[in-house]
Image: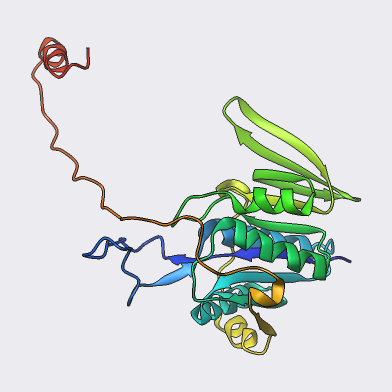
């Protein structure tokens, strides 16, 4: 059976308060807890469940970034992934560069599915899955809240403004996951110990034919959100209307 490729991103843990550097050049990452992107963790859990149902041969976890990302890939291996691949680079990669790297891995490993989170909680781009589907010339189903596999097809339920939308796509395909798809499993100590012996291959963008040079976009400055103004308590509806009128809202 064909494998499933799961793309993962290393991000600042969702429980950590993000702080801007004094010079505005970025966010503080030194000494900050890093974790798997929560949406990607859901994607990994779904891939593991598909394999456990006997509908996939193996689960391959893939990530891009510096050597420290091996820690998050080991977490993925502890969750149950069979092996991992790190595209190691010290430069931040744009979504298109990540999609190009994933495309090369798709051509090598011939997965039936590529699953990844709908977005990362650090930049909220939500672009990588769509770009990969376009480059790979395969169908895509985004924001999946339910995923069912049949012979050669994936049936995906996704939430939209008007309710639920159900799509059927031919495999191989790219799926991006939403929060309601599943709840990731808890990693226990024995699995963490076993993960140390699982294979983790390190490759470079150049070996995949992907440039890791200067990104086409340059962030000029980071700024923290403006402090929230204090609320005003009014004594009556008439006073509220008057106050809103003074502020030009009405």
- Considering depth in this image, is 206 or 139 the residue closer to the camera? 206
| Residue 36 image offset from top left, x and y in percent | 52, 67
Q: Judge left or right: residue 243 versus residue 158.
A: left
Residue 242 visible within the image: yes
User: In the rendered image, which quarter is residue 196 located in?
Assistant: bottom right
In this view, the residue farthest toward the right is 151
Point 67% across, 90% down: residue: 197
User: In the rendered image, which quarter is residue 57 located in?
Assistant: bottom right
Instruction: Tell me if residue 145 comes above or below residue 13 in the rendering.
Output: above
Color scheme of the displayed model:
rainbow
| Residue 129 image offset from top left, x and y in percent | 65, 52
User: In the rendered image, which quarter is residue 229 located in?
Assistant: top left
| Residue 198 image offset from top left, x and y in percent | 69, 85
Point 10% across, 14% down: residue: 239
Q: Judge left or right: residue 104 versus residue 66.
A: right
In this view, the residue farthest toward the top is 238
Point 64% across, 86% down: residue: 194
Q: How many marks?
A: 0
- Considering depth in this image, is 165 or 28 the residue closer to the camera? 28
Instruction: Tell me if residue 116 comes above or below residue 208 in the rendering.
Output: above
Quadrant where the N terminus lies?
A: bottom right
Quadrant where the C terminus lies?
A: top left
Residue 45 visible within the image: no
| Residue 140 image offset from top left, x and y in percent | 73, 45
């Amino acid at each position: 059976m064909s494998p499933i490729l799961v793309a993962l991103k290393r991000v600042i843990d969702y429980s950590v308060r993000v702080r801007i550097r004094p010079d505005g050049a970025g966010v503080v990452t030194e000494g900050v807890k890093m974790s798997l992107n929560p949406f990607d963790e859901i994607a990994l859990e779904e891939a593991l469940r598909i394999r456990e149902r006997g509908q996939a041969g193996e689960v391959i976890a893939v990530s891009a970034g510096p050597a420290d990302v091996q820690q998050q890939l080991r977490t993925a291996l502890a969750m149950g992934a069979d092996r991992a691949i790190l595209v190691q680079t010290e430069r931040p990669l744009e979504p298109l560069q990540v999609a190009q790297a994933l495309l090369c891995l798709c051509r090598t490993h011939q997965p039936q599915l590529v699953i990844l989170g709908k977005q990362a909680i650090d930049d909220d781009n939500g672009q990588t899955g769509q770009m990969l589907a376009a480059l790979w010339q395969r169908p895509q189903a985004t924001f999946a809240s339910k995923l069912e596999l049949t012979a050669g097809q994936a049936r995906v339920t996704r939430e939209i403004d008007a309710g639920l939308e159900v799509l059927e796509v031919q495999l191989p395909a790219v799926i991006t996951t939403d929060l309601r798809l599943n709840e990731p499993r808890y990693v226990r100590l024995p699995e963490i110990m076993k993960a140390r012996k699982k294979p983790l291959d390190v490759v470079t963008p150049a070996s995949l034919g992907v440039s890791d040079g200067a990104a086409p976009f340059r962030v000029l400055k980071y700024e923290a959100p403006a402090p929230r103004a204090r609320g005003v308590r009014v004594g009556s509806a008439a006073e509220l209307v008057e106050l809103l009128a003074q502020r030009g809202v009405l």
